[in-house]
Amino acid sequence: MSALLFYREITLLNRERHRGLRLKPTGDCRFAANTHFVPLAGQEFYQAARDYPILFIGEGEQTVPIALLGLEPERNEFLDDDGQWLANVYVPAFIRRYPFVLADTDAERFSVCFDAAYEGWNESEGEALFDDNGANTPYLDEVVDFLRGFTAEMRRTEAFVRTLQDLGLLRPRTLQLSHPGGERFTVNDFQAIDEEAFRALGDDDVLALHREGFLGWVFAHLMSLGAANRLFDRHIAGRDAAAPAGAASGSA
């Protein structure tokens, strides 16, 4: 899985070269229109579980939790016709940090990068990144704080995944989805926490999960799987809305 997904032209932010750079957000999320999943930090599970199935993909050390945004590659079901994220739906931090990203370095030293292909960059309008002396503006400081916080939470999430693996809780899983109209869809090639294995844990292991702050994440993940059928409903509604007038409904 690519860690950058919709990022197209990653550029290291340079205090001298980019001193005059400004960011005027385009006001929409069309950059994520062709993305059907994004990585999710464990701390986001509580809010994300209401709207998205939270699944685990990848193998070994590359296993990560994701918010599933669509049932087909390059199809995000959570954007409206204007490219806005749907109202009253949690927006994952991976989306909110765009067009910035923190370089993958150690915990003490890091570099801020940005997607130079994003349409909001210019030198006349929007938020300045540096002042006339080359110092960070308050806006850039807020961005850096957000990036550092997200990176820290993703590292904590890596520890969560390792714990699940060590306890043997992550197992391959298949979801069989159904729609009132009779259509069916199968989601596979992912892992989820096995409820029987979880219930079989000893008291010490459950207490350790609780003390690490992971126990709530387990329950939020399991609850999120119920959002899969709602995602299927969005999938069918979006497909039918895009179909030519009078066209027969096809299979999902």
Image (tube, grey):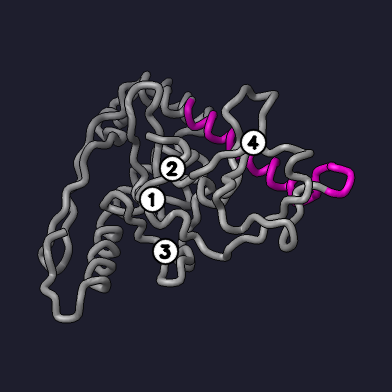
Residue 12 tag number: 4
- Residue for badge 1: 35
**Mark 3–mark 4 distance (CA, rounded to whole Å):** 29 Å
Location of residue 158 in the rendering, given as x and y in whole percent from the top left corner: 47, 28
Q: Circle 1 sits in a helix, a strand or a loop, which is it?
A: loop
| Magenta-span inclusion, residue 138 | yes
Q: Amino acid at mark 4?
A: Leu
Residue 47 tag number: none
- Quarter of the image for residue 168 reads top left
- Quarter of the image for residue 103 reads top right
Location of residue 140 in the rendering, given as x and y in whole percent from the top left corner: 74, 47
Mark 4 packing: few (<14 Cα in 10 Å), some, or many (20+)? some
Q: Circle 2 sits in a helix, a strand or a loop, which is it?
A: loop
Q: Residue at x 12, y 61 (%)?
A: 251
Task: Judge from the rendering whether residue 184 lies leftward or rightward of residue 165; answer left or right.
Answer: left
Q: Nearer the viewer, mark 3 or mark 4?
A: 4
Q: Residue at x 26, y 52 (%)?
A: 72
Q: Amino acid at mark 1?
A: Thr
Task: Judge from the rendering whether residue 192 lies leftward or rightward of residue 41; answer left or right.
Answer: left
- Give the residues drawn in magenta, as a range: 131-158
Q: Nearer the viewer, mark 2 or mark 3?
A: 2
Contact? badges 1 and 2 (CB < 8 Å)? yes
Which quadrant of the figure contains the C terminus?
bottom left
User: Does label 1 or label 3 sit earlier along the sequence?
Assistant: 1
**Mark 1–mark 3 distance (CA, rounded to whole Å):** 11 Å
- Residue for badge 2: 5
**Mark 4–mark 1 distance (CA, rounded to whole Å):** 24 Å
